[in-house]
Amino acid sequence: MGNLAVTQTDKPERRQYTSEGRTYVVNCIKREVKVTARVRVTHVETATILGTTERSGSEKSDKCEPDLTDLKPVADLTNEIARGVAEELANYIAPHFELQEFGLRKVKGKEAEALEKKAGDAAKELRVDEAFAIYKSLYDKDAYSPELAYNLGILHEVVGNPLQAAEYYGAACQLKDETGCRKAVERTARATAYQKSLAALGVQIAQHEFGIGEEALAKATARNLEMRGKREDRVSVFAEPRDGSEVVTAVPGGLTFQIVAEEGEWYRIKLVGGKEGYVHRDKVKVKDR
C-alpha cells in the first residue's frame, strides 16, 4: 500500500538578451515537477508492517518566448520521474541482483603469507569452500588476526550468510577499528534484517555450509610440487626415501602432485589411485610456498 504525491512549480521570469546591438526582454517559464512515492509492505494475514520506504525524484523544463508552447507537460515529466521511482520501489520489495566487489585483506605472518596467494586465487575463481578452508585453518591458529577475521566475513557474505559474516566482521572491528570494517558490519546487518523480512513472508534463504572436513582442509592447505622435465621424460617414485629402494611408479615430467610429508631431502607425494611414494628434491619444483 502507499500513495503518490506530485508537486508542480512554474516560475515565471523575464530575461534580457542582446542581439545586433539591440536589447530584448522575453518571458520565460522554469517548470519543475517532483514525484514522491511512499510504500508500506504489510502481511495480509497478521497486518504486521514488514517495511516502509519513500522514494522521490524531480525533472525540469525551461523555455522562453517564442517557444513557450514547447514547455514539457506536467504529465510527461511525471511519467519520466515515475519510471525511475518505480524501479527503486520494486528493488525494495522484491529480491534482485546487485553487483558488488570485495577486496580480501593481506594477511600478516610467514605461514599465512605462504598460503595467502592460494586462498586468494581460489576466492577469485569462486572456489569459496577451498578459500574458506585455508583462511579458517590459519584463523584457528591465530584468532587475533583482524585480516583473517575480515576475510572469513567476506566469504560468508558472498555466499549469503550475513549473520555469520557479521560475527567475523565484528571480531575484525574489535581488533582493528576502521571505516571499511564498520561499513561491512552495517551492510550485513541490513542483509540479515532483509532475510528476516523474507522469512516472515515464507521465503527461506538456505545457508551455505562450507565443506571444511579434515580431507578438504588437508587438500586446501597442502603444498604441491611439479616434476622437472618434459612429458616424454619419466621420474622414478620410490617406496622409501632412498635411492635403490623399490620403484612404485615412474611419472611424466611437468605433472603436479600433492606433498604429503617432507623427510630430509625427500618428499612423500600422493599418486593417482591413492598410492604414495617418495621423490628426491632435485627432481621437483615446489609450488605454492
Image (cartoon, helix red, strand yellow):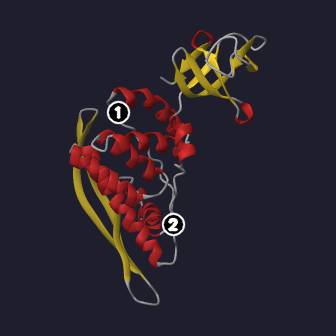
Residue 267 place in picture, x, y as percent:
58, 21
The quadrant in which the N terminus is found is bottom left
Tell me where residue 288 appears, x and y as whole percent.
51, 24
Does 5 sit above or below residue 284? below
Vertical order, 21 against 180 (above or below): above
* Residue 64 seen in the figure: no
Please state which of residues 160 and 60 is positioned toward the viewer in this rendering. 160
Residue 86 in view (yes/no): yes
At horizontal 49% and vertical 68% (from top left) the residue drawn is 94
Tell me the distance, in whole angstroms, between the alpha carbons under discs 1 and 2. Answer: 31 Å
User: Splitting the image into 4 quarters, where does residue 17 fall?
Assistant: top left
At 32% from the left edge and 29% from the top edge, which residue is drawn?
109
Instruction: Tell me the number on the disc at residue 107.
Output: 1
Identify residue type, mark 1. Val
Residue at the image position 47 percent from the left and 53 percent from the top: 98
Q: Nearer the viewer, residue 283 or 47?
A: 283
For label 2, count other residues whose C-alpha is less than 10 Å away and answer few (under 14), some (14-19) or many (20+): few
Counting from the top left corner in percent of width and height, residue 156 is at 44, 52
Taking depth in this image into account, of 247 and 157 the one nearest to the observer is 247
Question: SS of the residue at dot 1?
Answer: loop
Compared with 282, 207 (above or below) is below
Of the numbered discs in the image, which one, if any, rests on residue 205?
2
Q: Position of residue 186 (x, y in %)?
A: 30, 56
Q: Kindly identify which numbered label has been placed on residue 213.
A: none
